């Protein structure tokens, strides 16, 4: 696979739209002109890379109409990569073209232009809710998800601490005394293997839960 394999199909597409097309003009792989319109620039590469995006951003000093072009591959891995890179290209006001080398099919996945991301109120609400519920600042910025202390884990820790001090208790009592309104569900779901059901509506602490109590100051930010 070579970058030059991409050129004939892309040239054919652009010429079909009324452009005059030439390759290797200065540092640019492909330049297309149509009347008095600004030039269209296409950079050809055998795959997505950060260097390709850097190159295309540099071409925006020449024209706003900059595309990056790569071969279209089969499989879910490429499909996922394409989706992610198209999203990045939109944010950078770049266009994305793929070429299926088996038959020369050219697809334009996005055109250059201003990008206005749609805000997700649901995600924003979840972010603010987690911020408000989390006690203190128990994590280190940049750490991996493993061992991350969430508001849910803090609630579970409050429950474990209460059961450690008081013993097996009814869910309603735990909720009232700890302030964790969904205490019964947390104990029933038992994501951390800290709780065990000892009677109808009554939960106790497992040995793993007792060990977790030792980490209470760090988890609760005390």
Image: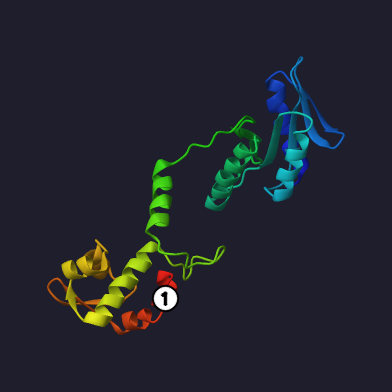
Seen at 68% across and 27% down, the residue is: 13
- Res 124 visible: yes
Residue at numbered disc 1: 217
Locate residue 149: give its quadrant.
bottom left
Q: Residue at x 39, y 55 (%)?
A: 132
Q: Nearer the viewer, residue 109 or 121?
A: 121
- 140 over 168 or under it: above or below: above
- Mark 1, other Cα within 10 Å: few <14 / some 14–19 / many ≥20: few
- Residue that extends furthest to the left in the rendered view of this protein: 200
Name the outermost residue toward the right.
26
The picture places residue 81, in percent across and down from the top left corner, at 58, 49
Residue located at (75% from left, 22% from top): 38
Work out which quarter of the rendered image holds the C terminus and state it. bottom left
Q: 89 or 132: which is nearer to us?
A: 132
Residue positioned 47% across, 71% down in the render: 147
The quadrant in which residue 101 appears is: top right
Left of 156 or right of it: where is 83?
Answer: right
Percent position of residue 150, x then y: 41, 64
Q: Position of residue 52 (x, y in %)?
A: 73, 45
Query: Left or right: where does residue 29 sit relative to residue 66?
Result: right
Q: Is residue 155 above or below residue 66?
A: below
Q: Residue furthest front?
A: 222
* Residue closer to the observer: 4 or 81: 81
User: Which quadrant of the structure image shows residue 205?
Assistant: bottom left
Where's residue 23, x and y in %? 82, 32
């Amino acid at each position: 696979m070579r970058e030059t394999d991409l050129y004939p199909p892309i040239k054919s597409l652009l010429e079909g739209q009324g452009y005059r097309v030439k390759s290797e003009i200065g540092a640019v792989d492909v330049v297309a002109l149509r009347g008095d319109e600004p030039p269209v620039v296409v950079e050809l590469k055998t795959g997505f890379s950060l260097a390709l995006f850097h190159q295309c951003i540099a071409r925006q000093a020449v024209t706003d109409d900059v595309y990056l072009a790569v071969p279209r591959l089969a499989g879910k891995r490429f499909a996922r990569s394409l989706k992610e890179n198209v999203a990045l290209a939109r944010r950078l006001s770049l266009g994305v073209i793929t070429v299926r080398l088996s038959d020369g099919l050219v697809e334009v996945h996005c055109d250059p232009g201003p990008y206005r991301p749609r805000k997700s109120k649901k995600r924003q609400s979840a972010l603010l809710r987690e911020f408000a519920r989390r006690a203190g600042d128990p994590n280190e910025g940049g750490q991996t998800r493993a061992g991350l202390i969430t508001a849910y884990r803090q609630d579970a820790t409050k429950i474990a601490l209460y059961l450690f001090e008081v013993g097996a208790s009814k869910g309603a009592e735990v909720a009232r005394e700890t302030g964790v309104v969904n205490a019964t569900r947390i104990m029933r779901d038992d994501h951390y293997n800290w709780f065990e059901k000892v009677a109808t509506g009554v939960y106790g602490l497992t040995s793993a839960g007792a060990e977790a109590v030792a980490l209470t100051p760090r988890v609760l930010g005390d």
